[in-house]
Image: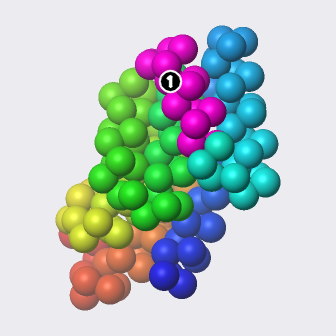
Amino acid sequence: MRQFNIIFGTYLFLVMVPTFAQSTSVESLIAQGDKYWQAGEKTLAEQSFQLALESNEQSVPAHFKLALVYLSQQRFAESVSHLQRVIGLDTGNAKAFAILGIAYWHRGDHALAQASLKEATKLDPQLDGAKKLLALFNEKLGNRSGH
C-alpha cells in the first residue's frame, strides 16, 4: 500500500494541470471534480467526471481524471479502461501512457506496465518520472536494461 501511495503521488502533480481544450459545460464539471478531488471527496469527484463524460464521451480530461480517481481507489481495471480511452483519443499523451503503466503494474501486468512506460518516455523524453518508474520496475523484475 505504501508503494502504491508513493507511485500514485509521483504522478498526482500531472493531473491537476489542465492541458486540454474543453467545452464550457464539460470544463465546469471537470473543474468541479478537481475541487472535490482536492478536498478529498473522491466519490463526488468521480460523479463530476462521470457527468462530464455524459456531456461529452470524447472528453480526454474527463477520462483521464476519472482514471486517476479509480487508480487512487485501487480500481485498476476501470482505471486501465479509461486510460486506454484517453490514448485512443490522444495517441501522443505521454502522461496517460505513464499512468497506464502504473495501473498495469498494480494489476500485475508487468510486461504491459513496462511497455506503457517505454512508450511514455519515447513520446516525452523529458518525463523523468516515467523513466524512474521504468527503471524501478525493471529492477524489481531483474531486468536492468529495460529490454
Amino acid type, callout 1: Leu
Q: Is residue 20 magenta?
A: no
Residue at image point 53% right, 61% down: 72
Residue at image point 35% right, 48% down: 78
Q: Quadrant of residue 145?
A: bottom left
* Of residues 53 and 5, the one drawn nearer to the viewer in this rendering: 53
Q: Quadrant of the C terminus?
A: bottom left
Main SS category, magenta section: helix
What residue sits right under mark 1 in the picture? 53
Q: Is residue 140 above or below residue 99?
A: below
Q: Is residue 52 magenta?
A: yes
How far across and how far down the image is residue 133, in percent?
46, 71
Residue 94 appearing in the image? no
Residue at image point 60% right, 48% down: 43
How far across and how far down the image is residue 84, in percent?
33, 39
Q: Is residue 48 above or below residue 104?
A: above
Q: Is residue 78 left or right of residue 12?
A: left
* Of residues 67 and 90, the one drawn nearer to the viewer in this rendering: 67
- What is the secondary structure assignment of the residue under circle 1? helix
How far across and how far down the image is residue 131, in percent?
47, 65
Q: Is residue 69 left or right of residue 48?
A: left
Q: Is residue 108 above or below residue 141?
A: above
Residue at image point 65% right, 43% down: 44
Q: Which contiguous range is marked in magenta?
A: 45-58
* Of residues 93 and 18, the one drawn nearer to the viewer in this rendering: 18
